[in-house]
Amino acid sequence: MGVPVRPGPGIDPGELRGWAGRKSLAEDARWAMDTLLSGNKVPKLAPYVGLLLGHHFVRIAYEGAIAIRSANPCMGIPELAVLLSGRFAQVTERARHLTKMLDNTKKTYADVLSEFAAELKVHHDALTGDAVRLAQWLETDLGLFYVNGALVGATVPIAYRLGLHPANPATMWEADLNAITMEWGGTLAVLGAATFNDSEPEATLDLAGIRVTSRDRRADRYLARRFDPQFPRELKMLILMIEGDLNTARLILPRTARGRQGAEFRARTVTAYHCLSALKRISDQHPGLSTSGLDRPAGASRRCRRPEAAVADRGEGQE
């Protein structure tokens, strides 16, 4: 098997760049597998790892598979590429692009909001309407996940970018969810061998301190109290996804860094990039947005001077 070239004296710069790329994708894949395996050792956390971090795992699987299939001899690894399954390649690609939020070049700003509106309706129709009239006010269609009191995810945006349907949770865009996740797991295992480290994936992280709590709400009532009142519900749901991602990067990702600092840093960097880019796009769509009347400590006031912070800070301190 043609293994990647070790960096050393006299190595071509292209080979060095290829080695660096392979090293990063192998680190990312091993971080993802370690996080999954370590999370599975904590029964109360295990169900949430894929939901809250799944978009990172999709990114790594999708971009890593492209890299080792590359025709560039400095990057591609044909011997590993033949081990990859492409049965659900379209599902993986679709999920990856949705993780980019408003950086998704395949969709316009209006497209994304229209899809969030449709996702809200799907969840409302699937999860409400069965109760007797007097009990309908108790029905819920939005699940919220918290760590240390901060929102880290919500069911509607998670379902949106992972193609999950509330009435059929065993599928992803109508394909077998278990088969898809098995393919992604196989891809991560292959990517983990992109350098000379051929050791078996193992659980090395202590994630027992992460405690996720959940609450169920009616989306229309909950969103009515969140963010700027001029925003439609679908935009508020997009901002809710951004809030969850930023809090996940702040409260969960650092717990996965021990021995995996490079991969964890890249995950936080990707999160910050897409979130701030999305907030800037939203701010540009609402040039009259003001933070007047918001009393914030000095640090928060400085953040409010940035356009993207004007949107985010309207959600601070609210459930």
Image: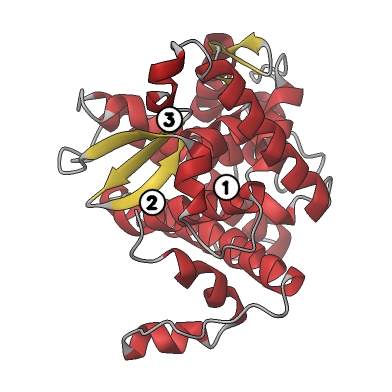
Q: Earlier in the sequence, mark 3 or mark 1?
A: 3
Q: Residue at x 34, y 36 (%)?
A: 35
Question: Spatial distance from mark 2 to mark 3, Cα to Cα?
Answer: 13 Å
- Tell me which colouring the rendered structure shows: secondary structure
Q: Residue at x 37, y 25 (%)?
A: 138
Dot 3 falls on a residue whose secondary structure is helix
**Amino acid type indicated by mark 2:** Thr
Q: Which residue is mark 3?
A: 50
Q: Which mark is residue 78?
A: none
User: CB atoms at circles 3 and 1 under 8 Å apart?
Assistant: no
Q: Earlier in the sequence, mark 1 or mark 2?
A: 1
Q: Which residue is mark 2?
A: 248
The x, y position of residue 177, in whole percent, is 56, 13
Q: Earlier in the sequence, mark 2 or mark 3?
A: 3
Question: Spatial distance from mark 1 to mark 2, Cα to Cα?
Answer: 16 Å
| 283 to 71, vertically: above or below | below
How packed mark 3 is, by other alpha carbons closer than 10 Å (few <14, some 14-19, many 20 or more), is: some
**Amino acid type indicated by mark 3:** Gly
Q: Which residue is mark 1?
A: 237
Question: Spatial distance from mark 3 to mark 1, Cα to Cα?
Answer: 20 Å
Q: Residue at x 44, y 21 (%)?
A: 136
- Marks 1 and 2: which is nearer the front? 1
Q: Residue furthest front?
A: 134
User: CB atoms at circles 1 and 2 under 8 Å apart?
Assistant: no
